[in-house]
Image (cartoon, rainbow, N blue to C red):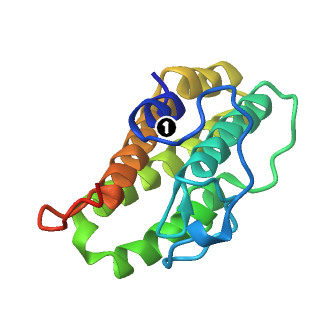
Amino acid sequence: MGLFAWLSRHVPGLPRAGDELPQADSRLHEPGPQTRFGMHPGAVVAGLDFFQAIEMQRRWKLRLAAYARGEARRTKAWHEISRDDQCELGRWLRQAAQQQPGHADVLGRLLAQHAALHRAAAEVVRLADCGQRDAALQALRQGAFAQASHATVAGLSELFTSLNARPADTPSRH
């Protein structure tokens, strides 16, 4: 089950798969590290839209696959792609690690997973650049990139759950 489906099943009020996403409500924006990620009500926690973060990763994988097949140009060299602090999510994670000390464990794991994803993406590009297109596609589908991608999505899910958890001593509004 994908993270979108999981979130839709476990978080009341989130759109179901295939639903048109509602427009953002500025009242739902919470203080935290700022991003340009689109805002979806219920999916925004500490300034990160979890739906959009996962969607951007999915699109990145599609662009890498097109590059590995020789159907697209790359915009960055593999050594630039390996830098996890240059993308929107990487910058947000670094800020959040400083601003959310109560979630340091989850954020630390996600930072490591995200860094592994960038290293694996760089390897896909490097393989494709060397003419090893089949190996690049294999890494995307079943190798290091596939594993790092899955771990990053799982880490985002864990962070979403952690940031949404109500402290035990906080009374319910119901």
- In the image, taking residue 77 as reference, residue 42 lies left or right, namely left
Residue 149 visible in image: yes
| On-image quarter of the N terminus | top left
Kindly give the residue lying farthest to the left in the view shown: 169
Of 47 and 104, the residue lying toward us: 47
Return the residue at label 1: 149
Q: Quadrant of residue 104?
A: bottom left
Of 156 and 27, the residue lying toward us: 27
Residue plotted at (69% across, 30% down): 19
- In the image, taking residue 86 as reference, residue 145 lies left or right, namely left
Position of residue 54 measured from the top left corner of the image (x, y, whole percent): 57, 44
Q: Quadrant of residue 159?
A: bottom left
Residue 130 visible in image: no
Q: Quadrant of residue 34?
A: bottom right
Say which amino acid is labelled 1: Ser
Position of residue 174 measured from the top left corner of the image (x, y, whole percent): 28, 54
Residue plotted at (59% across, 54% down): 41
